[in-house]
Amino acid sequence: MLPTMKIGDVEITRLISGSNPFTGKSHMDKATDEDMKQYFTEEKAFEMMRKCEKAGINGIQSRGSMPAMGLIGRYRQSGGKLLWLAQTGKNLQTFDEELCELMKYDPACVCIHGELADDLLLTDSMDKLSGLLDKIRRYNVPCGVCSHFPEVLTYCEEKKLRPDYYMASVYNLFQPDRSHDVNPTGERFEDSDVPIMYSVIRSLSAPTIALKILGAGRKCATQEDVREAFINAFRSMKKGDGVLVGMFDKYVDQPTLNAQYTLEAIRLSEKD
C-alpha cells in the first residue's frame, strides 16, 4: 500500500482517486465529458477501481449522491476494498436528509461539500459551519471541510472549529468570474491561485487533501508534466498531506502511473 495519512482513526493513502470521471465531469470540455460517459460503464468503473487497489491506493472520494455513491457502494459490495471518502450535498436546506442517506453507504469520513462551504463564505453565513461539522460528528465519523477559497480554511483555523481534515482545491473555480456559466470556452483555471492555496495548506492544523493538482487535465500534456505536478504538490504541502486525483484509464493506466509519481514525490519531499 502507498504511504498513508491519518484522518481521525482512519489510515488513508496519500493518493486518493476521484470519481468525477465516472459521471463525465471532466472540468475540461464537452467532448471529454462525453468520452468519459461513454467509456465508464459499470464494468469499466469497477475495473479502474481494481487498478487503484492493485497500485496501492485505498481510498476513493465522491459526493454523497447518485450515481457515483451507488456505483462505489456496489463495487464494495462486490468485494472491493476501497474506503469511501464522502462529500455532503451542496444544498444547506437538504443537508440533514443527504447526510442521513450517505451514511447508509458506510463512509470512512465525511466532508462538507466545497461549494456549500464556499457559498457560506459568499453569503456571509460562515457561522453555520460549526453546526454542520457537529451534525457529521454525531454519526461518529471523521469530519472535514472542503473549499476552493483559502479564506474558508483560515476561518476554520481562526475559529478553532477543529475538523479532522481539510480538502482544498488549488484552483478557485468558485470565483464568480471563473465558472463555465460566464466563460464560453469553459472554466477558467488561474495558475496564480496555486501558490496561495499551498501556502494556506501548510498553515493548517489538520491533514489536508489537495484537489485539482493537475488542473483537471491542463497539466497533463506529457507524463513528465504530470510527474512534475505531483512533485510540486507534495513539496508544497505539510508532511502527511495527500492529493485527490480523478483518473481516466481509457488511454493510459493512470492509477499505476499516479501511484508511481506519488511515491517519488513523497520521497523527494522528505529529502527537502
Image (cartoon, helix red, strand yellow):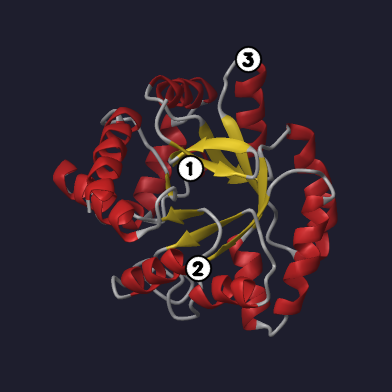
Which comes sooner in the sequence, label 1 or label 2? 1
Quadrant of the rendering where the N terminus is positioned? top left
Mark 1 sits on what residue?
Answer: 18
Can you see residue 182? yes
Q: Which residue lies furthest to the top in this view?
A: 79
Residue 110, placed above or below residue 117: above
Q: Residue furthest front?
A: 271
Residue at 45% over, 77% down: 182
How many discs mark residues in the rendered view?
Answer: 3
What amino acid is at disc 3? Ser
Mark 2 sits on what residue?
Answer: 148
Quadrant of the rendering where the C terminus is positioned? bottom left
Residue 13: image x %, image y %?
47, 36
What amino acid is at disc 2? His
Residue 3 falls in image quadrant: top left
SS for dot 1: loop
- Mark 2 surroundings: few (<14), some (14-19) or many (≥20) residues within 10 A: many
